[in-house]
Image (cartoon, rainbow, N blue to C red):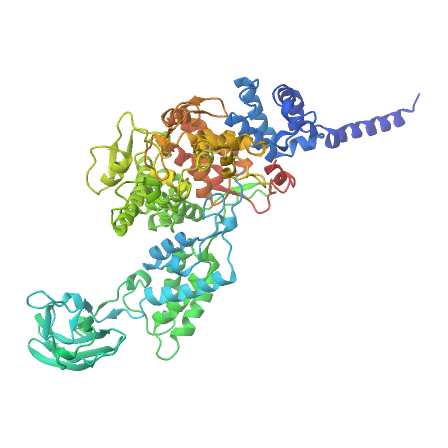
Amino acid sequence: MYPRSKLLSQLSLHLMLCAALPLCAQPLPAATHFHKDIEPLLSQYCYECHADGVDKGGVAFDLLKSDDDIAHRPQLWWKVLKNMRAGVMPPPKKDQPTPAERQTIEKWIKYDAIATDPALPEPGRVTVHRLNRVEYHNTIRDLMDFDFKVDEEFPPDDTGYGFDNIGDVLTVSPMLLEKYFQAAEVIVTAAVPKVPRVIVERRFSGSEFRAADSTRTGDRLSFYKESSVARSVKVENAGTYQIVVDLAVQSSFDFDPGRCKITLSIDGVERSHHELAWGEGTKVHLNTDEKWQAGEHQLTFHVEPLTPEDQKKNTLDLRISAVNVAGPVEEEHWTPTRNYERFFPRAESPKSDPQRHDYAREVMARFTARAFRRPADAKTLDRLVTIAESIYKQPGKHFEDGIAQAMIATLASPRFLFRVEEVLHDGSAASQSSPLDEFALASRLSYFLWSTMPDDALFALAGRGELRKSLKEQVQRMLQDPRSEALVQNFVGQWMQTRDVENVPINARIILDRASAGKVDRQQFEREIRLLRQSMRRETEMFFAHVMRQDRSVLDFIDSDYTFLNEKLARHYGVPDVTGSDMRRVELPKDSPRGGLITQGTVLLVTSNPTRTSPVKRGLFVLDNILGYPPPPPPPDVPQLEESLKHFQDHTPTLREVLQVHRDKPLCAACHARMDPLGLAMENFNAFGGWRDQENKQPIDAAGKLLSGEGFKDVRELKQILKNQHRLDFYRCLTEKLMTYALGRGIEYYDTEAVDRIVEQLDQHDGHYSVMLSGLNDSSPFQRRRNDNADDPEDKNPSHRADIGT
């Protein structure tokens, strides 16, 4: 027998090895559940196409050799989940899992393969977000009360995931950085007053000066005809007034001998005169100072020809460009400069230090808190005050000049140009995510709903730490604010592509094929088409805004018994009894194929080719924007659709016939089986959104069958299938689109739980828009962000990007 001490020693070693064994050999929970519950189901329903040497779509489940490989392929399992939910896997003709089996697979993918924590779903991390052009314009408008022309000054923004507010693609080039510096100077120079009070000025155009018989105005006065134009100016205070007149000569390029004298008279007394001659672009200034009493005073311009009319060779006219009346110039009558109180809280700035230093800090603290969307730190304020002092302490410079220079630095700062988000740390080093602080939450909310900076109410709530608990009330307030039109224009403008409808190349003359089109004046026809396009855009925008603000079911986006029309658009759609140019809600006839978004002119135009419809584009649009299951990109060397035309010698084929030939090609079959039935269901709508019953003198067949198995005879039945059998797909698609726009990043596999919770709430509450919006605003991705010290789930899975293309 072993000695007791030796036996205990070996037993102790054995126990230590057994204790260590689970750390290196214990099966992963995801793999354990996979082998027990999931692998048998995959073997029964999926291995025929995805195992035993068959890897359709590049997926072979039996190649997942190790437990680690099973547990660390989230992108692959996310794809499996989406295809299963879409009803395309397993294919409809194959045996289908029971609802309980589907639920088992879904739960394993979400909570094991993707490793979602249901108590606190992974929020992800948003790349620091540069203001895009729309956000920059609106922020400058609200911060500076200045309309900066971003479309003229900045290059277009790149897009990602269908939107132009995605942090990953909003990069900053050296050229753009230089433009930001230039823009800051232009904006501050134009918007920030340099003095607290100014002389009152009024400016009048030449068109406001008229002849006694009203036949002529000061816009155009001939050198060869004697004439007078006048207008009265009413002043309320007695004092000295400065009158400055800008005149311009308008002539042809060729010389004309004409000369004239222009005389300015005030209250019947001549005050100034000037002789003018030929010279395109010649400009003349007349000015005079007047002592006026309160009341009305008459300004009269008299043109006296100095050259006989028979010597006239070309057009030669005089134009009164502007008349500026400033006064009284006495200081007691000066008025506060426009917007002075916006930037400077006191009526007058201190004249000496240290009062000026303290006031400069007060002004810049107030300004930067709004510009940076959060209070600035002490060091930043110190630097900005130093900039201001370096200017206003110079001879001849005002306090306001120094503040303006500091504001230029503020608008060129990364903290203005980028939406920097900070979090509230809970003190736990192990925490993977943290809630956004309230200032970051205010910015997320305002740029989501308004595409601009938070307003005073949001700032005040964030400053008191009360925004999060009053989020629902604030969202309701913000949706009723006119600024929420930005959500309509920018989200819908990209989701439904309303931004493109007015410019997408469509040959209306060919498509409409009106007998009268050739007889109508071309400019008039183009104008009517332009107005029709504008009405289509407004129809979609007003339709979305109505669902949003009236809190209707988002299923109205698929089908509805109403839309928004004016007389022209109603006539184009064939909807009777609509008159007038105003867009308004219209109840549709019971048999109307219209209703919902996919039968609106906007969608029908942007998914067409210049001279014909495109069932492929339309089908792809529905898959991507309604069902949320776009097919993969087409493989290289796919034959063009037009190549299929050579198979028809005896007649001009319909698009359905051409697509059938194209779809028979192995490279094309899989994707077109998903897209074509959806697009062909919309073939009764021509490329300009009008209804038709024939194509190439053959009846249009709009019937089809979805890859998920449902059949339909026309677009009406298709919309009902989408609204009922596929409502969860639409809820999920719309939620993902809106979440992408709200977060400024694409949806990832770890967002599945957050999206599913919103979809579940939508289905329980009949799809009301407010349910989706509140669910999004309350979600972990919107309220939180991954900590900087946390592991990125994608870093743990270096092969996941390859899964995307499988």
Q: Quadrant of residue 678?
A: top left
The image shows residue 663 at horizontal and vertical percentages of: 53, 31
The location of residue 564, given as percent across then percent down, is 27, 37
Image height of 298 relative to 714, above or below: below
- The answer to which of 432 and 357 lies nearer the viewer is 432
Q: Is 676 drawn above or below residue 325 in the view shown?
A: above
Query: Would you say 207 lies left or right of 122 here?
Result: left
Q: Is residue 419 left or right of residue 529?
A: right
Q: Which residue lies furthest to the front in this view?
A: 650
User: Where does the C terminus fall, quadrant-wise?
Assistant: top right
Q: Is residue 119 in sight in this rendering?
A: no
Q: Residue at x 34, y 70 (%)?
A: 400
Looking at the rendering, which quadrant does residue 720 occupy?
top left
Picture quarter with the N terminus: top right
The location of residue 164, given as percent across then percent down, is 45, 48
Q: Which of 591 and 145 is in front in this view?
A: 591
Residue placed most toward the observer, 609 or 604: 609
Query: From where the camera sits, is residue 702 visible?
Result: yes
**x, y (%) of residue 301?**
12, 74
